[in-house]
Image: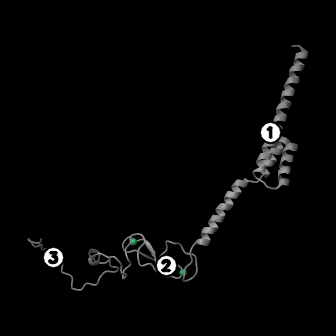
Amino acid sequence: MDPLTTNNFILGLTAWAIAFLVALWVSLILWTFRDIRSRARDPLVRILAVIVVALLFLPGIVVYLILRPSRTLEEEYQNSLEEEALLQSIEDSPLCPGCGRRIVDAWTVCPNCHTKLKKPCHECGMLMELPWNLCPFCGTPAPGMRRENITMDEALRPLPVEEEPEPESAPEPATESAPEPDAE
Ligand SMILES: [Zn+2]
Ligand SMILES: [Zn+2]
């Protein structure tokens, strides 16, 4: 092989390698600049990150990847929003009128001081505030409360009972052993 051609080949190969390394170096610096811009607000930190990568090249990228802030500013912002919302929901939770501790809306009794907090509707079982005398879910009045615009049918319908009624007369003895033929 012609020594001149070999030389030219090596020269071309070297030039190509240098061009590739320069392109890689510039793109790594650009990538670092964009990456640190999304992670740090401090201009000094941004400049330092770019300088480390520009001076150390590939090892600089490794150093940068180790030292860069783990979360981007966007993630940081989302995180702070979530924390704020969580804090807000804690502050918004109601307090027990008996002991002042935080309670959950679905509780009927305070577990700490046993104060009654809510009452269940007799018709649908949904929880009602204690002062309410009408269920907002099904419209049933609370026991002992008068309902306006009541129809005769509704007035004559037996009210839902809270406790087992006391038997007024003695219960009939069960006669299952000897059923009468004409029972119905
Ligand atoms: Zn309480
Ligand atoms: Zn109800």
Front position in the image: 68 or 10: 68
Q: CA distance from mark 2 to mark 3?
A: 46 Å
| Nearer to us: label 2 or label 3 | 2
Using the image, tell me which numbered label, if any, was put on residue 175: 3
Q: Position of residue 140 (x, y in %)?
A: 37, 74
Of the four image quadrants, the one with ligand 2 is bottom left
- Label 2 CB-ligand 1 distance < 8 A: no
Would residue 22 be found to the left or right of residue 39 on screen?
right
At 53% from the left and 82% from the top, the residue drawn is 113
At 8% from the left and 71% from the top, the residue drawn is 182
Q: Dot 3: few (<14), some (14–19), or many (≥20) neighbours within 10 Å?
A: few
Circle 1 residue:
27
Circle 2 residue:
117
Disc 1 marks a residue whose amino acid type is Ser
Using the image, tell me which numbered label, if any, was put on residue 132: none
At 33% from the left and 76% from the top, the residue drawn is 149
Residues under numbered marks 2 and 3 in contact, where contact means CB atoms less than 8 Å apart:
no
Q: CA distance from mark 1 to mark 3?
A: 97 Å
- Counting residues from the start of the chain, the first of labels 2 and 3 encountered is 2
Find numbered disc 3 in the image and state the secondary structure of the residue it sits on.
Answer: loop
Corner quadrant of residue 151: bottom left
Front position in the image: 100 or 59: 100
